[in-house]
């Protein structure tokens, strides 16, 4: 394959994985990196490109989420604080478990999360006719709020917040140990444990995975191990794919997003195990 | 009892506009980097990487400043903790390598 062919494949893969990632709020790196490795890119080059795709996709999806009020920043910052604490502890203790054991543990958790999301019927939160567009937003001092969908305003109230935050810390620890991003765990915890609507959970996770990936990319950049030309191609693909993915996510109903998320999570589990 | 942050959506729409401009800027810069190629292209692409590393955190700084302005001190503490943890985490990881 010539240089142009390789470049086009890179853009297409970044667009595809970022589009799928934006749909479920899981980021695309966990799918992009194995695909790049399969198509002949060394792991050391593919991993930073995965981080670039996550940040670009997070930024591309952000405008729509901000405008619709689907992202819950308070929930995002709270969960990211717990996840970052865990990730730092995990990164400092790298090596206490074998990578294979960690990968299988994460894969099992992902499949369990997929089953939880996929098996649940109906929706937890319903439109409230007494609420107006000005009621869309977060509650001051908590992670409760309301979001808009199809002209309706849907209020929600978080549950099991301390447990959910603790799980985020554990997820951060395990993903820090394993050296993978944790977007694929954050959305299910936010949606299924803390009971935030899946669209809010996906938008919030899309925001926080951009934060995590930007730190990892900065550390990688210090080491100078980024192919900046390939990164630019990934940026172009990821922005295109995530823009489309987030638009689709805004239009489809929460149960559809949940089912799509379940399928994506199973694909992620397979990708992780294959990569290991 | 908590109250709704009514001004949030309006503030977020301004942020969405700014974000759109940044995304368009990043896209154009990445495109220029790819088209130009060579050392000049690499410099443009490197700038794109630096912007990607910084922009997500500017949003957190904006959030903390806004929460402080509306008196949501609980989440100001959470936001400052996140920013501090991140700086410590990056420093520890960089030192470890």
Image (tube, coloured by chain):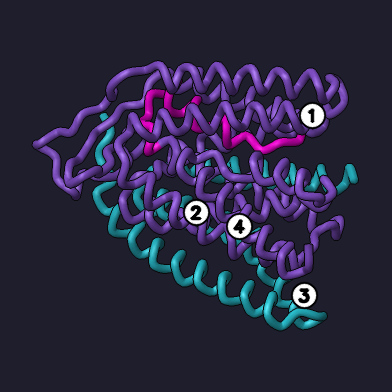
Question: At 28% across and 58% down in the image, what residue appears?
Answer: B10
Pointer 2 with pointer 3, Cβ within 8 A: no
The residue tagged 3 is B42
Which of B31 and A69 lies nearest the eye of the viewer?
B31
Which of A62 and A274 lies nearest the eye of the viewer?
A274
* Number of the label disc, if any, that sits on residue B58: none
**Disc nearest the viewer among 4 and 3:** 4
Chain B rendering hue: cyan
Image check: B47 left or right of A27? right
The residue tagged 1 is A276
* CA neighbours of label 2 inside 10 A, class few (<14), some (14 to 19), many (20+): many
Would you identify the image quadrant in which residue A269 lies? Answer: top right
Determine if the magenta segment contains residue A159: no
Q: Chain of mark 3?
A: B
Callouts 1 and 4 in the same chain = yes
Dominant SS of magenta comes to helix
How many angstroms separate mark 1 from mark 4 (CA)? 24 Å
Stretch of the chain drawn in magenta:
A179-200
Callouts 1 and 2 in the same chain = yes
Question: At 80% across and 59% down in the image, what residue appears?
Answer: A226
In the image, residue A164 above or below residue A249: above
How many angstroms separate mark 1 from mark 2 (CA)? 27 Å
């Amino acid at each position: 394959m010539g240089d142009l062919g390789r470049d086009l494949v890179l853009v297409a893969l970044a667009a595809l994985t970022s589009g799928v990632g934006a749909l479920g709020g899981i980021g695309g790196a966990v799918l992009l990196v194995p695909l790049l490795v399969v198509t002949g890119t060394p792991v050391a080059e593919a991993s930073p490109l995965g981080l670039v795709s996550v940040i670009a996709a997070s930024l591309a999806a952000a405008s729509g989420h901000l405008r619709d009020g689907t992202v819950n920043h308070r929930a995002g910052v709270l969960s990211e604080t717990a996840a970052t604490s865990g990730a730092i502890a995990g990164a400092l203790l790298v090596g206490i478990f074998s990578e294979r054991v960690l990968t299988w543990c994460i894969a099992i958790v992902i499949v369990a999360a997929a089953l939880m999301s996929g098996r649940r019927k109906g929706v937890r939160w319903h439109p409230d006719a007494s609420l107006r567009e000005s009621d869309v937003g977060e509650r001051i001092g908590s992670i409760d709020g309301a979001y808009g969908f199809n002209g309706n305003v849907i209020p929600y109230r978080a549950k099991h917040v301390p447990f959910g935050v603790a799980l985020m810390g554990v997820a951060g620890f395990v993903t820090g140990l394993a050296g993978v991003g944790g977007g694929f765990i954050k959305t299910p915890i936010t949606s299924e444990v803390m009971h935030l609507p899946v669209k809010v959970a996906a938008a919030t996770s899309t925001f926080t995975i951009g934060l995590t990936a930007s730190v990892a990319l900065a550390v990688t950049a210090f080491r100078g191990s980024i192919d900046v030309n390939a990164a630019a191609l990934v940026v172009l693909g990821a922005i295109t794919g995530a823009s489309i993915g987030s638009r689709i996510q805004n239009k489809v109903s929460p149960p559809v997003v949940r089912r799509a998320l379940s399928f994506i999570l199973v694909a992620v589990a397979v990708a992780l195990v294959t990569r290991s | 009892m908590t109250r709704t942050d009514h001004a949030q959506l309006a503030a977020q729409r301004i942020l969405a506009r700014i974000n759109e401009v940044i995304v368009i800027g990043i896209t154009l810069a990445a495109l220029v980097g790819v088209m130009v190629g060579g050392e000049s292209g690499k410099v443009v692409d490197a700038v794109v990487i630096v912007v990607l590393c910084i922009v997500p955190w500017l949003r957190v700084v904006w959030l903390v400043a806004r929460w402080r302005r509306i008196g949501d001190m609980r989440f100001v503490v959470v936001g400052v903790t996140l920013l501090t943890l991140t700086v410590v985490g990056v420093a520890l990881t960089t030192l470890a390598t």
